[in-house]
Amino acid sequence: MEKSGRYIWKQVYERLYESGNPPPRCPEDINLAQYTRFLYHKRCMVCDTRIGHHTSWMMRLRACHHCLTNTALFSTYRYTSEGLLSIRSKKSSFVWKSELEEIKEGRGPSANERYKLRAVRMEGTREFDEWEERCADSQSADLERRRTERKDAIMKKLEEIGWKESYIRDLNCGSMPFGLPGFGISKKLTKKDWEAIEFEIVHRLSDLEHQNLPRLKQRRLQTRWRLFETKFNEWNQNQTSPEWSFRPRLADISILEPFRTVIFCSSDRDEIHYDFKMEDIDRVAKEWMASRDSYIFSLLPQDLQDLYQGYKPSLPPLAIFRFCGLLHGTIDLICASRENALSYPLSLELDPQDRDIYKTLIKLASSSPPLCPWNWNWHNRDFIFDIKAYRITIDILEFLGMDPYTTTVAETALFKQTQFRCFMCKNPWLPLNSFELMIEHDLLCHDNPEDEQMLPVSERWITAVDTIASDFQIWSNEWQKTEYHSIFLE
């Protein structure tokens, strides 16, 4: 090598030795040009055609597996006790065949000379191995970077035709599908490359969507429902009025806008990360209660509407407000009760989308009991004001000494500790300890106002305290009316 060439090589390596990944110092037995070929020229130094994957610092050699195993230059050798220079593959060690024959024939350098040469050549082996490992890591990182750039380029192309990465991952349980064409290659994506793989990728993704879209839609629906349920429960806990019976349930307002579209009608491809706002829930809930109250107020007879006009549309929970239909009871009872609207004949009038939403609510409820999945669909109930129960309630409240037009349902609960008996019934021993049971009793047993034998409420009902002294007389009178009493006298 000429002096100028040596100077250039030396300047280059001085900069390399100060770099972030410096190679070992060049051994004295080879020049910098030979050293460069050994370090950086990846082809086999024997055949100069294949990639030389196997290196040996002591031999200053880079060789391919074919040359090591299929040429006359190398021999496999298990032991290196004779001081032979060696190169390793994955499973075997190889030495120069010529040196091995010299030892067998007793020619060449002595054993001591060979050991000394091997010891000199071994100096720097650890530094070379560490440098090779750093180079391999750097190359691996570079290849990974190129693969990532290619993958990002492919995903950008897919997004342009409607396939977002987030949607693909959702279809495939959070990860990208394995083995998609064009992925995993450390080469820049060209227009020609994309044209070659586009059809196959879209076909594979369409098959994946067909298989997993129902599961994805259900999972997304459950996620949106849980978010809405959490926010609604927070709103419900912050309410002090009206009472719980008169508030809407989760299912009541989930089918109203804007929640209906977000929860049940979201796009299959684009997941909407919707933040359910407390003010929206409060506004929709109040609108729902106002609509419900207006409907209930419209059921009252005109005289009661005139009497309670000042409360419109929200009626007080008075005991005289009685309604009947598919269920009957007081105003708080019918407001609190929820039943499946799909079980009623009028549900046939629902449009298909509403019917699908009701079915979805039932499925959601089955996964998170004890949620009631049905809304208070008053249009399907045919409620009417119960005139009979209304009149009976007035009579009983007056019998109990209470004002029928101001007494609430909660105030009637005070009579749970008192027992009452009806003397018009065949079994006067049956005590009733509930205001509601007294009304139910009169509706079932004494609901005919034209009955001439009907006694006024004040004469028909008596408290158990008033009957203690006359219990024996009652029993005696009843006993005398029975056939058993006649048989006993005979």
Image (tube, helix red, strand yellow):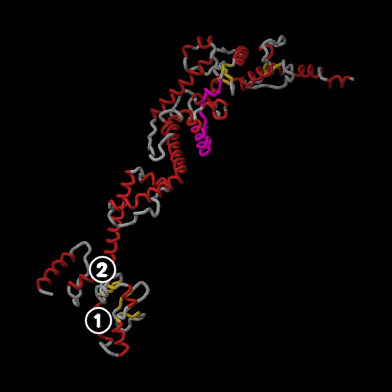
251 falls in the magenta region: no
- Residue lying farthest to the bottom in this orientation: 106
Task: From the viewer's side, name the closer residue of 292 and 489.
Answer: 292
Q: Is residue 183 left or right of residue 464?
A: left
- Residue lying farthest to the left in this orientation: 4
Q: Is residue 66 left or right of residue 379?
A: left
Determine whether 175 is above or below 304 in the image: below
- Determine if residue 290 is in view: yes
Q: Is residue 63 left or right of residue 281?
A: left
State the image coordinates of residue 411 (x, y, percent, origin top left).
56, 19
Q: Which residue is mark 2?
A: 42
Task: From the viewer's side, name the closer residue of 439 and 168.
Answer: 168
Determine whether 178 is above or below 304 in the image: below
Cα–Cα span, label 1 and label 2: 26 Å
Question: Which image quarter: residue 90?
Answer: bottom left
- Determine if residue 397 is in view: no
Q: Is residue 265 left or right of residue 56?
A: right
Query: Which one is earlier in the sequence, the residue at label 1 or at label 2?
Result: 2
- What is the secondary structure assignment of the residue under circle 1? helix
- Amino acid at dot 1: Leu
Q: Within 10 Å of the Cα at label 1, are there few (<14), some (14-19), or many (20+) other Cα atoms?
A: some
State the image coordinates of residue 233 (x, y, percent, origin top left).
45, 32
| Range covered by the magenta-colored residues | 357-382
| Location of the N terminus (image quadrant) | bottom left
Q: Residue at x 45, y 45 (%)?
A: 210
| Location of the C terminus (image quadrant) | top right
Which numbered circle lies on residue 166? Answer: none
How many tags in the picture? 2
Task: From the viewer's side, name the closer residue of 162 and 438.
Answer: 162
Q: Which residue is mark 1?
A: 117
378 falls in the magenta region: yes
- Residue lying farthest to the right in this orientation: 490
